[in-house]
Amino acid sequence: MIRTVALAMGSAIFPAVAFAQGPADRLALQTDLDHVWTITAAALVFLMQAGFLLLEAGEVRSKNSVNVAQKNLMDFIVSVCLFGAFGYMLMFGISGNGIWGWQPDMLFFGAFEGWDVTFFVFQMMFCGTAATIVSGAVAERMAINGYLISTVAIALLIYPVAGHWAWGDLLNTDNEPFLKSLGFMDFAGSTVVHSVGAWVALAAVVILGPRIGKYDENGKARVLHGHSPVLSTCGVVILWVGWIGFNGGSVLTGTTEFAQVVANTVVAGAGGGLSLMIIGRIGMGVFRPVSSINGTLGGLVAITAGADIMTPQAAFFIGVLAGVVVHFATILLEDILKIDDPLGAIPVHGFAGMFGTLAVALFGPEEALVTGSRLSQAFVQLQGIVLVFAWSFGTGYIILKAADRFFVLGPHGGGLRVTAKEETDGLNVSEHDTPMGTGILQTIMAEVARDMTGAKKRLEMDYGDEAYEMSVLFNKIMDNIDGEHAAEQQKYLTEKAKRMAVEAEVSDVMKACAKGDYSKRLSTEGKKDFLLEISSGINDICDATEQTLQAIGLSLAAVSRGDLSQRIEGKFEGSLAEIQESINATLDTFGLVLEQVQSTVSSAAHGNFSTTVSMDGKQGAFADLCGDINALCEISERGLTELFETLRAVGSGDLTAQMSGDYSGRYAEIGDAVSDMAGGISNLMSQIKGTADAVFQTSTKIAESNEDIRQKSQLQRASLEENRNLMEDLTRANGETLSTAMTADALCKTAAQRAGHGRDLTTRTREHMTEIDAAMSAISEAVALIEEISNQTTMISINASIEAIRGGNGGGSGQDSAKGFQVVAQEVRNLATRTAEAAGEIRIRTDGVQNAVSQGVKLVSEANQSLASITEAMAESSSCVERLCEVGALQQKQVVDMRARADEVSRSAEDNLALASKTSKLSEQLNTEVGKTLDYLETFTGDHSVPRKAA
């Protein structure tokens, strides 16, 4: 189930894993995972620096804790710089006879790309680990300068060369490293990393010697406890976590192989811690922290060489045995060889690393051994151990001994080791100017013990020193000793000073009270008997007075904010109680009055002026205020009621209504304004009515004119019909003239007679046409009159709209009246618009008829002239019959044209008759609407004296 969930989560987080189908995809994905895992492992190895820092800082005395912490930081900085600049090339460059590498393009962080970068980061962490192992072994006595020389030697030369012997082909597979070609196996560096650091540390401590006080006069080792086992324990836990990356990352691939390595690492660490924890408990009777710490570290170091081939069972036994090796190696170094290693770095990293390297041949699967047999593999492993020891210890000893000699000859002397005083005071001060611990305190106390006159001395320590509190206590003790003999002498002076101080305090308090400041008090601290009673009594008086004034101030402040609920609280007596009662009663009355006034004003705000303020129990200004408010409500109620009645009467058409009450001020102005409004409306209604009457009379005349036009149009239509008949007769006569032209005499006589008759007819036609033209002129004048009436009607509607707007501002019934004006105005405007449109259409038609009639008159005149010519021609017809025929034909054509024009005039006359009928109907409608307007106006004016008749 867990595996299924893990696979599902992996597919969600890394979708490329789930869908990498082809070999190329899987190869690319695996390469990416290799990078990710190796970099993650490098980060875990880097975390080991923090573990070493805490481990070493907790195992040393506090006066040296800053020093070892700084050494851990400094050695990592130096190792990264030097290993990257030169050591990495020496370790992984092109091999020279399998002893060292050399490849100039790798100098100073060069030739890095792809996997090389990841591999470089991982190996850089390893170099830092090898360098920092020295720090714990040389703690509390080695100068920083000398320590950095050891770091330079490891990063620049010792570790790269030893590393090349065993791992020189990891980056360049063409290399044939010296030990690797023999079959030497060291998976993650039990020898290459840990033993290298431990053997250089051994060389350093041999040169430095033990710490001051480590061995007594008999040469027996003393236990110099570290200042914080808690830090040390935390450090080993961090190292354990970092070791997962140290060993697991050495697989250099993100495959399932590193799981076995991690399991072996954890199990071996636990086995080592368990074995040394038990041994320590048996040997010392207690569980000393150093036992479980060094046992765990020994197990981790031992499994490092064969973590990739061991089973968990073998890893456990290797860890257990490593703990035993660490225990006896510590006894060998500390008790027999008198080598002082404060943290046991040499037993843990050197001896346990040596054992772990041999354990590869003893516990590893035989089929996994390079040489093929345990004995031969053990021999090769032993060769590697001896060679790496000889290289690391020998080279380290030579370099450090030379440095020690150089420093002795230098201006400061002393070699690699600090001076005895600096070591006694602690390296925190001498190397970093960061004091910690009780060294200075111990020195001063020793001086005081030797010379009691030194009792006058005091400790001066930085606030940040951990012994600062102890120095403060020491100085207080010395102060007590110095002040003991002067106590009695100061007693009298103290008492006298107290009395004088009380007198001065009383004077200050009284002066402050006189100025109204009751906040000052007499101090009662250290006073007794009479002084205490006086001070307490004065303070009580000030307290009571101040509380009363504060309560009064709070009440008055609340009143100023409009809050009448604040009262003077508390129990007072005498005059203060009377003041309290009086102020509270005043506030109660004030609150009641304001509550009633607020209720009345609130009712008035909602239009109810009938609510009044009760006058019961009101006196003085309260009575005046309440009476004025009641009077205001009464006059408002009466005035608004009468105003309402007046406006309602005006809205009902009674324009004589007025406010008859006796008012003054604004109410009197309102009454006058209402009266003026009613009078103005009445006058306006009279004017509108007069205008409407005029419109009514005008519309009546328009209707009469339209009737006259209609009658004349009918006469015109009959005349045109008669003219049409005459044209037809003339046409027939012309035909006969043509048919009888051959008989000149008879035809000429007949033609002369009929020509004379035709001339008479054309003369009459011209007269009729003249009459039609006169009628059209009359119609045009009537249309102009209609347009003028329409314009006047429009002006009336505009005036009515304006008055409607004025009436709408009066509210109530005034708005109803205004709405009625608006309706009437709109109807009048619509009627005027329609009248104007009809008049315009009549004018257009009349102009057309008039033009046609004028053309007919012209044509008839021409016909008359033609007939005269015919008459004259008849007299000469005897000699030109043939020409008469031609003239007859031409005359017939002209008559046809005249007939067509006469038909057009007839149609125009018909149209004029229709328009006249329409205009008559519009006039009747206008007359009706004006009548309605007059009826509506009579509602306001009450005048029914103007008679009206329908048009």
Image (cartoon, rainbow, N blue to C red):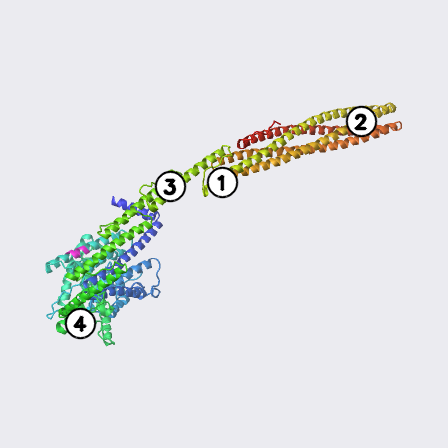
Whether residues under marks 4 and 3 lie with C-beta atoms below 8 angstroms apart, the answer is no
Whichever of labels 2 and 1 marks the residue nearer the N terminus, that label is 1
Mark 2 crowd level (few <14, some 14–19, many ≥20, 10 Å Cα): some
Which is nearer the eye, 326 or 310? 326
In front: label 2 or label 4: 2
Mark 1 crowd level (few <14, some 14–19, many ≥20, 10 Å Cα): some
In front: label 1 or label 4: 1
In magenta, the rendered stretch is 269-274
Whichever of labels 2 and 3 marks the residue nearer the N terminus, that label is 3
Which is nearer the eye, 514 or 315? 514
Q: Which residue is mark 2?
A: 760
- Left or right: 347 with respect to 855? left
- Left or right: 689 with respect to 847? left
**On screen, 591 above or below 650?**
below
Q: Which mark is residue 457?
A: 4
Is residue 259 visible to the viewer in this orientation of the structure? yes
Q: Residue at x 50, y 33 (%)?
A: 654
Q: Position of residue 474 (x, y in %)?
A: 16, 67
| Kind of residue at disc 3 | Asn
Q: Position of residue 617 (x, y in %)?
A: 31, 42
**On screen, 543 above or below 819?**
below
Which is nearer the eye, 423 or 763? 763
Magenta span contains residue 270: yes
Q: Residue furthest right?
A: 879
In front: label 4 or label 3: 3
Q: Which mark is residue 630?
A: 3
Whichever of labels 1 and 3 marks the residue nearer the N terminus, that label is 3
Whether residues under marks 2 and 3 lie with C-beta atoms below 8 angstroms apart, the answer is no
| Kind of residue at disc 4 | Lys
Q: Position of residue 127 (x, y in %)?
A: 27, 63
Q: Which mark is residue 672?
A: 1
